[in-house]
Amino acid sequence: MKQYETFELRFQGEALTENYANIPLDATFTCDGKTTAVKGFYDGDGQYVARFFPEQAGEYHWAVSGCIAAEGNESCEEAAEDAHGLVKAVDTHFEFEDGKLYIPFGTTVYALAHQDDDLTEQTLATLKTAPFNKLRMCVFPKDYDYNHNEPPCYAFEKKANGSWDVSRPCIAFWQRFETILDRITAMGIQVDLILFHPYDRWGFDTLSQRENLVYLDYLLRRLAAKPGIWWSLANEYDLSRGKSLADWEEIEEFVAAHDPYGHLLSCHNCICFWDASRPNITHASLQVKGLSAVPRWLERYGKPVMIDECCYEGDLPHFWGSISAREMVNRFWRSCAGGGYCTHGETFLDDREVLWWAKGGVLKGKSPRRIAFLREIMESLPGPLQPAEGGMIQLMQMSDSEVQEVLKPLPEAERSIASEIVKSARRMDACDREILLSGEHEYASHCDEEAYLWFNDLQCLGIQTLQLPKDKQYRVECIDTWEMTRLLVADKASGTTTIRLPVKEGLAVLATRIQSETHHSCKIFYPPGIFCPGDKRSWSAIQRL
Amino acid sequence: MKQYETFELRFQGEALTENYANIPLDATFTCDGKTTAVKGFYDGDGQYVARFFPEQAGEYHWAVSGCIAAEGNESCEEAAEDAHGLVKAVDTHFEFEDGKLYIPFGTTVYALAHQDDDLTEQTLATLKTAPFNKLRMCVFPKDYDYNHNEPPCYAFEKKANGSWDVSRPCIAFWQRFETILDRITAMGIQVDLILFHPYDRWGFDTLSQRENLVYLDYLLRRLAAKPGIWWSLANEYDLSRGKSLADWEEIEEFVAAHDPYGHLLSCHNCICFWDASRPNITHASLQVKGLSAVPRWLERYGKPVMIDECCYEGDLPHFWGSISAREMVNRFWRSCAGGGYCTHGETFLDDREVLWWAKGGVLKGKSPRRIAFLREIMESLPGPLQPAEGGMIQLMQMSDSEVQEVLKPLPEAERSIASEIVKSARRMDACDREILLSGEHEYASHCDEEAYLWFNDLQCLGIQTLQLPKDKQYRVECIDTWEMTRLLVADKASGTTTIRLPVKEGLAVLATRIQSETHHSCKIFYPPGIFCPGDKRSWSAIQRL
């Protein structure tokens, strides 16, 4: 037994042919007086298995009861260097159990496990070199445009009448599925496992609620002891034909109650967001394209916000499958610079109808390289990003006197205008205001006083003024998110710092704190070939030498 | 006197030095038993003037009373070929009085009239060849970043204490201002005249309400008989320090009541929209960047919707002055393809701090050529565009049974999903829904069954399916809004028509009805060099030969 690695007890017993989904097989694992109870599962051919995920090293006593009776002791070694435990939500970001920061850069291959072996191998080979460390994929096969194939096998055996017999899981399916999951997580990729989805022609979306719970029980017995798996209750829960809201809530409760370890748990919408403030839910998993509201959602839920579907890079005749690589990259930066996280998908139609978003295969788009570049930057930061404080939404929630207090440092003319703006925004129709403010949103975030990130998005600011702490020094870079270049534009910058930028879309500005005792004045670098307005009067004010 | 041309009666009388803003000078113009009463104004040097705008040809009797007494007859000729009368709002579009369609393509030069003569001449020369037929400009000078100059003259003389004496309009100012207006309107450009604005250091924004009305009275006496002028109560009314909402309503009422001809009348916001459903208001003049809601605003107001400020093409360190040419062009297309209209502005900083948006000069940006291209297309259409019917917002306003009725023609699976989507949208937080729907908006509009326009915006649809009337034939073009090319992609198309498009952003699709009796089947053209998915199965279904 090794900390953060699945431990398995396997016994030979009576071979079962009926009703083997939720067998009476219980196990306990006790260490330092703390006992974890798990349920075992039937793995075919008279194999009875109990799995355990040891979250601490030490001396364990285990005991199995029910249809198998056994007990023993096991010593659990300290975790290997590359094992970090489950990913957990901490405030509005993610960490492994050992405290290592996890920053999700997801992709989407819904029906990865329902393709033939050749295609599956190709997909896994692609994932090996792709920049993604999270993957949205389904337990059940997908029926939709460009997805008409039968999977190699299904999660259940069939009854004589042709309907699914959830009491007889298809062992071949689960063994194959589990192997795929293991191979993906072994690459350092977290699997955001989608438990239900509406794009179905086989009846998996319209099982009875009793059947749903039998299925989930078996799945949790098999998979809960594996790190690297998250529970996504659904892709587009609100399009399900078979489940009411009450059913979904019961499913959420069931998964949370039958998972001994507290894997990440979310539920993905088509239209209406699942309420991520519910206690069982660990983070918001949103389908939405407008990303200016990420800070609002972070405040609402107090949990990480994943933009798990923001359209796909591709050329489909559907709005959701036809954004450019550039727009996909922009959506990643908008999410990250707003304190959230984003998920990629790709839908280029080819003659085989193998689209990455559902079947896998190879990546054809231009966004993954740029997502890799963003990931490198995000992982170089000293910690997770929080959205910048202030802004209209926060001002609108304050009393008039609080607003005046906040605006006090501004010069009189600006204070007066800012105060009128807040009053005007309060009078406004809520939907109009949302549209208006989303168009004026500044994508800005920071990691305490260690790093500040601005994503300028469509703004082509020739000059930008940053407000940095006066008592610290920063290295300021202009990042071209499309060309993937980083250019030093100010070194040893402190306080109000004005930089010049190329006049183009898709730039970000990153200020990272310099750990140095010596204080120098700010020097501005003028990158060659960059537009430079020549007015001496206005520039004399901002050139601090 | 000529129909649609300003007629002026000018009398010599006593020279006035005090209190000559609202002199007792009344005139009536009677034709065919219909009398129009106007007020005259003092034009300096003992000149008393009454102006009239004849909206019909015929025999007129006029009579002047008050400080001048005179009467006479005047024959009014039919309008010259190039005179069309005032622009009026008709439903959600604009027409001249003679019924000619007017499609606004505006630009912005706030302080045009407050620059020296050389710069003013340069601005007028630029306007002569620019693609704009509407101009937002202010009566009062502008004080703001990059705008610190004193104007050549001011609207009023000063009192001994240095404050403005609104009872003594500065005749030199008004004569110069009027000449500039006349020269602009003579180019076929409608002046959207901004009566108040908050960017002020001289006190024009903080006159008393009594003074405001004296000023407006004089302005209306002088200018109301001129075609080609619209009244914009304000630029950013809600940032005014000197006026309450009640003041603004009184100003609106005053302007409407003292304008004998009903010039177009609007009020432009910074944040909270002015309520364009108020009876005096002829159209919405909005500052907003999110343009997916144009159809919603058209429905709300039942009047034309002008996006009079959508940010400016430029490189300023402000979000409002730093959008790319491409984004400006996109915003024009989004507005027009949504059934609305858009206004341009440009803010490139140069060493003289002459930015087109406020001072004029020359245009430096890349959007005007593309706006000219759009204008050419819009003016080639057989009539004004209305937004496409249907869509989520309309479905959400219907009862469940009405929704089912609308969805009836869909295949069962699609109907079921569509119905779940409507239900889910209804449950949603209104602000989240606005953000969500704005990201999924289809920019689509039509001119009855004569023309259909889609703007694909950021969508890179490799294939697009159009729903055209089955009993008519259309010529379908792919328009590259940036490259300014038009490519025939389907001829004699009817009913459901699938076209192939290059995989890129910024494309529009225009279907115009072919006026022909012969009915041919639809033939799809494959433009050379365009991505062409090779799957025979999917293509067999859509290739209608």
Image (cartoon, coloured by chain):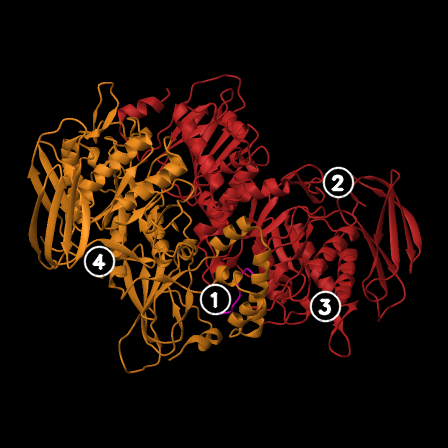
Chain colours: A red, B orange
- Helix, strand or loop for disc 3: loop
The residue under label 4 is which amino acid type? Glu
Q: Residue furthest top?
A: A518
Kindly identify which residue carries mark 4.
B97
Marks 2 and 3: same chain?
A: yes
The reply to whether the magenta stretch includes residue B107 is no
Question: Residue type at mark 3?
Answer: Leu
Residue at which label 1 appears: A350
**Subunit bearing disc 3:** A
Q: Are marks 1 and 4 in contact (CB under 8 Å)?
A: no
- Identify which residue is drawn at 24% across, 54% down: B87
* Amino acid type at mark 2: Ala
Q: Earlier in the sequence, mark 2 or mark 3?
A: 2
| Mark 4 nearby-residue class (10 Å; few <14, some 14–19, many ≥20) | some
Q: Is residue A233 left or right of residue B503?
A: right
Majority SS type along the magenta span: loop
Q: Give the residues in magenta.
A: A350-357
Answer whether residue B143 is visible to the viewer in this image: yes
Residue where numbered disc 2 is placed: A79
Image vertical order of residue B157 relative to residue B120, above or below:
above
